[in-house]
Image (cartoon, rainbow, N blue to C red):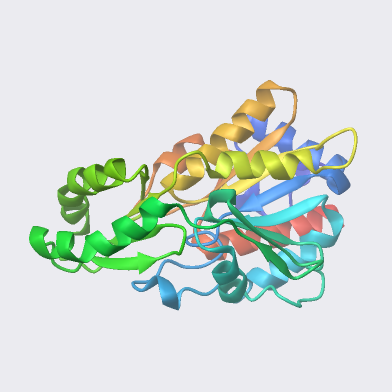
Amino acid sequence: MTADLWPAPTGAPTTTAGREGLAALLAAPERAVIGLDFDGTLAPIVPDPEDARAHPGAVRGLALVAPRLGRLAIVTGRPAARAVEYSGIRGRAGLERMSVLGHYGRERWDAETDELTAPEPAPGVAVARAALPALLAELGVVGAYLEDKGSAVAVHTRRSPDPAAAMDRLREPLGALAGANALVVEPGRHVLELRPPGVDKGGALRTLAAEAAAPGPSAVVFVGDDLGDLAAYDAVDALRAEGVPGLLVCSGSDEVVELARRADVVVDGPAGVVQWLEGLALALG
C-alpha cells in the first residue's frame, strides 16, 4: 500500500517530508526504525507516575507492526525496567525483538534476552535526591512531589493548584541544584527532571538507526508528546538531511504544543497512537 492510501485518515502525514518518510517505511519496512515515548504517548498521563500503564490497545498495536519492522523500541526517560513493567510488553507474542531504551538511552532492555544493561547512577543524582525534600519544604511549593528514577530524580507539579506557576517557581532553584552537582534540568509536562548530561532521546534514536540492516535504515520514525522528545525530533531531521527519510508523529495534548508544530502527523493522545499503529499494520498488509 502506498502512503497516499493510508487507511487511517487521522494518521496521514500532512507534510511532504512526512509523506516521503511513510512511503519509504512502507517500501522497506524490514529496515525501518520506529521509536516511541512511553508517558503521554503509549500511556495516558496520570497524577501519580507510579500509576501509569500502557493504553489497553498499545501492546496489541505494537505487536501488529513489530514483526514487519527492522527495529521497534520504547525510548523513555523512565528506568528501562519500569517501562517494561508498566508497558506490559514482556513475554508478549510478536514483541520478541522489541527493545526499551530507558533514562534517555543510558539503560537498555531487549526482549530477545530479557536482559537489562544499566550503568551506575551519577554521584550528583544521590546528592540532589537527598537535598530536594528540604529544598521543596523551604520553597513551600504546594503539591510538588518527588519521583525517584534511580539515575535521575524528578519534581512533579501536576498536583499543585497552579502547576505552571509551581514550575516557574522551581526552575531557578532546581537549576542551581543541578548545576552544583553536574546535572541538567529536563522540563516536561508539569515536571522538572534532574539528570546527568550527555544523553538524550536523539542519541538513543540514532543508536537504533545504526542497528538497521545494510544498507541502513529505510526510514526513521519517532512518536512522542513532550519536550524531552524534541531531541528525537531533531535526530530525525538530522537524518533526513543525511538522506534518510523520516516521519515525526505527535501524541497531541493541550499541555505541550511544541511537538505538534513540528510533526508530520498529529494524533489524539495515546488512543490516537494506538489507532496510528493499527493503521500502519493495515498499510503493511
Residue at the spot x=23%, y=60% of the render?
131
Left or right: 164 with respect to 188? left
Q: Specify the quadrant of the image occupied by residue 215.
A: top right
Residue 272 placed where, x, y %?
56, 60
Q: Pick the quarter of the image with the C terminus.
A: bottom right
Residue 182 placed where, x, y %?
36, 42
Question: Viewer-proximal residue, 54 or 6?
Answer: 54
Question: Viewer-proximal residue, 49 or 256?
Answer: 49
Look at the picture and state if 216 lies above or below 241: below
Please count the marks in the image: 0
Residue 123 visible in the current orientation? yes
Residue at the spot x=73%, y=67% of the render?
115
Residue 124 placed where, x, y %?
37, 51
Left or right: 111 with respect to 133? right
Question: Viewer-proximal residue, 55 or 182?
Answer: 182
Left or right: 25 with respect to 45? right
Residue 145 placed where, x, y %?
26, 68
Q: Residue furthest front?
A: 123
Residue 254 visible in the current orientation? no
Question: Viewer-proximal residue, 15 or 251?
Answer: 251
Residue at the spot x=72%, y=36% of the render?
21
